[in-house]
Image (cartoon, grey):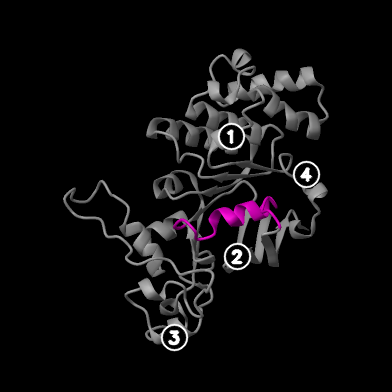
Amino acid sequence: MERILEVKDLHVSFHTYAGEVQAVRGVNFHVNKGEAVAIVGESGCGKSVTSQTIMKLIPMPPGEIKKGQILFQGDDLVKKSNKEMESIRGKDIGMIFQDPMTSLNPTMTIGNQIMEGLIKHQNMSKAAAKTRAVELLEIVGIPQPDRRVNQYPHEFSGGMRQRAMIAISLACSPKLLIADEPTTALDVTIQAQILDLMKDLQKKMGTSIILITHDLGVVAEMCDRVVVMYAGKVIEEGTVDEIFYNPQHPYTKGLLRSVPRLDLDRDEPLTPIFGTPPDLLRPPVGCGFTARCENAMRVCQEIDPELNDVNGPSHRAACWLQHPLAQGRS
């Protein structure tokens, strides 16, 4: 299957007054053409930093790409200048940001914000761009789009602002769409509508999607594969079925145990993951999950495990319990 994006050994740090925060520490993953891939994990695990680095939206300084490659259709985005990235952002790679109220420009109408990319990347006239903006608002389910196109963000509800963000990100029919917590601030009814909209657009346009979320229910509904991150690293990846029905890393198992389930006794308490993630100013030498893992061994403290195949090449986990040399494995 053709890979549209491949991230190789990506390291991203932030230089602060307290020292160097190693936010992303050797991330590897890929996205195939037309595929939806979820990146999940606790706050601070590096999900959003990874996505913003792909778009090269990390302010430098204090941010720095220390090492690695981001191959988009074979081209390394790390080597691209800001001017070169301007021709890629919006046109080939779109992004739905976490909070539409702070991401939308309050001084510009929704229509002008959609038209901006069409005029720049598609060389449309203002009249043609406005006509297309109305069409896009209609596609994403905004009522009375010919009137709404002239309104400002504060005149839209939360769900409508998120739909407007999707319209902006899809205006130039990007090959890859990065959705950073696209349903976090929305009620469940609007969440379902937004997810249905994204799935429909993916099917019609063949767009590849990276979905960054805390909501594992959204992942199960929408994605083909899952990348689990912890302490700036990928610690497990696999298909949705492999991750949900056969998780191999203790952290992934903990995430799934902490999610409410309808098929269990309502009085049964949720099992949290005790402890806190490691300080990335001083990341641990071994596995970052050691201090919180009930199965931790001495080797976990001393050597960081690599991703190893588990039950096939599509499912990999970075855990010494899954290493081929571990006791009980051939």
Name the residue at the front extreme. Answer: 17
Task: Nearest to the eye among marks 2 and 4: give it.
Answer: 2
Would residue 1 be seen by someone viewing this image from the given angle? no
Q: Magenta includes 233?
A: no
Cα distance, mark 1 to mark 2? 44 Å
Establish if 46 lies above or below 98: below
- Give residue 141's position: percent from left, percent from top: 54, 23
Tell me which numbered mark, 3 or 1, is placed earlier along the sequence: 1
The CA span between labels 3 and 2 is 33 Å
Q: Disc 2 to disc 4, how far (Cα)?
A: 31 Å
Other residues around mark 2 within 10 Å, as few (<14) / some (14–19) / many (≥20): few
Residue 46 pos. (x, y %)? 54, 59
Of labels 2 and 4, earlier in sequence is 2
Tag 3: residue type? Val
Hey, which quadrant is residue 87 in on the image? Answer: top right
Residue under label 3: 299
| Residue situated in front as seen by the camera: 258 or 206 | 258
Which one is earlier in the sequence, the residue at label 4 or at label 3?
Answer: 4
Residue at x 43% of width, y 76% of height: 322
Residue at 53%, 17% in the rendered image? 143
The kind of secondary structure element at disc 4 is helix
Camera-nearest label, 1 or 2: 2
Q: State the residue in front, 129 or 324.
A: 129
Considering only order in the chain, which callout, 2 or 1, is on the residue closer to the N terminus? Answer: 2
Sequence-wise first label, 3 or 2 = 2
> What type of secondary structure mainly makes up the magenta span?
loop
Locate the N terminus and report the quarter of the image it occupies.
Answer: bottom right
Question: Alpha-carbon distance for marks 4 and 3?
Answer: 46 Å
Residue 17, numbered label: 2
**Magenta-highlighted residues:** 41-60
- Looking at the picture, does residue 171 appear above or below residue 267? above
